[in-house]
Amino acid sequence: MRCPAAATPTTGVTEAPSPGLREQVARLLVVRGSGHLSDGQRRYPRWELPNGELQDLLAAGVGGVILLGGSAAELRLRTEQLSGWARHPLLLCADVEEGVGQRFEGATWLVPPLALGRLFASAPEQALLLAGRYGRCTARQARALGLNWLLAPVCDVNNNRANPVINVRAWGEDPATAGALAAAFVAAAQAEGVLCCAKHFPGHGDTLVDSHLALPVLPHDRQRLEAIELPPFRAAIAAGVGAVMTAHLQLSDLDPERPATLSARVLEGLLRVDLGFGGLVVTDALVMEAIAARWGAGEAAVLAFEAGADLLLMPADAHTAIDALVAALSSGRISLARLTQSLRRRDAALARLRPPASAADNPMAARPLLQLAHAVAQLETAEDLELSRELVQLSTGSQGPSGLPPGPGVNLIRVDSALANPFLPVLAPALQRPLGKGYAPVLIDGRAPSPWRADPEAPLAIERLPQGPVLLQLFVRGNPFRGSAGGEENWAAVLRQLLAASRLAGLAVYGSPYLWETLQPLLPPDLPAGLSLAQIPLAQAQLLEQLGLPRSALEGGFTD
């Protein structure tokens, strides 16, 4: 019996490359671009390629683009522009784990998946239905704007409360919950004609290190992986997920030399053979420090492809990656059959996509601007809005009486950054509702003058704050590049300090259920306080309403 192509041995004989080898290799790359149309609007120019380079790469055959930033309308224009630059049909993707509105303004931004993971414990059927609606909403809006590949769901089990990067992005804190909800998301989303991507294989939920910053090393053996990490991926694969994304972490028991992204034992042995996955395997971004700090752009791309990855996401240098792969294929280090195999998987994935409506089906096709305006105006349906409201209500809870003492007072807000903060615009409820009651905002972030002093029992320099009662609002959650799960400040000591000074008027925690569970036992039962797992303005409004701060006239905005 003939061996499958995956098992074709590599010989030392140099195979003559076909004339189109470089273009074929380019199809395996997914590069980063901005959702904005102009180079000057790029949010992260370190990673987002300028238009000229992006256009050249797509003309050379690069097969995918990951997008971030811009409005829904811009994204629709951008995806059409990129497709027009490309030689072949593109895979156009985004990290829309919390709905398309998480990345592109004007679409629906949903609560973090862990909110449904928490609901699953008490109402599993309701949680499963909501996970399906979550998937449909995300997929339908993505497809309407030109995206055909959702880099979601996160299939990691967040069983480590201190996880700095997965955290509330996970669908559950145990394998059964995470697997059931992720599978429901996949089935509903892919029924809308897009691809999903289960990530980060073989499981990033029990790490203390963010792989954007360094390489996590885990001691877990195969028995442990089978019990905790692998079940959600098995569930997603059973649901037909189109792609699996690798994790930049090292499992020393499986492969003591290479991280999972570069390990054939993990990608071919564990994922392909043992789990039986036949779809696309894509790396996590190869620019992340877990990989880039040790391997150059070319060797990282070759090692990942050699290990079993089909697509290479965000190599540190696309040209260098293509050069290195062409050299490896030309020398016989990697067989041409292996390249053919990945290209066929990519073609099969594209064939699963629902094609866009034809011009004959669209009476406004001859008027593209009207067509765009119509698509964006119809993007967020009444069902989407209801889903967003329902999820916020289910993921928000409070204690104590409703109402804060009258101001003047202090609205003390903790955020990671006041400058890059899409959930805290100037008219956000967290700013305007307390202001309507006389509570003036004071923001704490990593760039502001430090409010801390070297006293572990009373760490907050409250003498620097204005007089009056204090409403404490903490926006805390794990996120890429944070390096911690958030809330590393000693908020328990701050609560005790404010209570001892009779100044704590209320507490609102947005994001981390783990911080809330640490602080809640310290609170008097008659103190208004609560948690929302979401940080979006709708969640702020819901929680503050429960704490006795109704809509303020200031939220309506003003004109200059």
Image (cartoon, grey):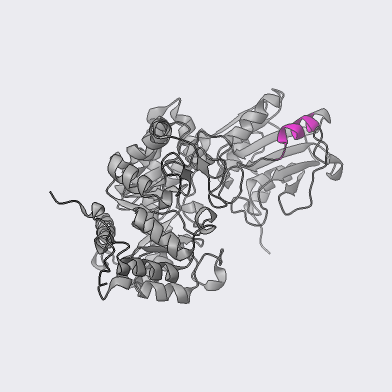
Of 14 and 526, the residue lying toward us: 14
**Which residue is depicted at the point 20% across and 52% down?**
4
Locate the C terminus and report the quarter of the image it occupies.
bottom right
Can you name the residue that lies furthest to the front here? 12
Of 500 and 236, the residue lying toward us: 236
Horizontal arrangement in the rendering, residue 85 relative to residue 74 (left or right): left
**Which residue is depicted at the point 36% across and 69% down?**
327
Q: Is residue 491 magenta?
A: yes
Q: Is residue 66 visible?
A: no
Of 502 and 18, the residue lying toward us: 18
Q: Position of residue 381 (x, y in %)?
A: 41, 50
| Total number of numbered discs in the rendering | 0
Q: Is residue 272 magenta?
A: no
Compared with 90, 170 (above or below) is: above
**Which residue is depicted at the point 62% across and 53% down?**
421
Q: Position of residue 245 (x, y in %)?
A: 40, 50
What span is in magenta?
489-499
Compared with 14, 282 (above or below) is: above
Q: Position of residue 425 (x, y in %)?
A: 63, 54
Q: Is residue 261 visible?
A: yes
Of 403 and 75, the residue lying toward us: 75
State whether the magenta stretch is mostly helix, strand or loop. helix
Residue 490 sits in which quadrant? top right
Q: Position of residue 29 (x, y in %)?
A: 38, 64
Can you name the residue that lies furthest to the left here? 1
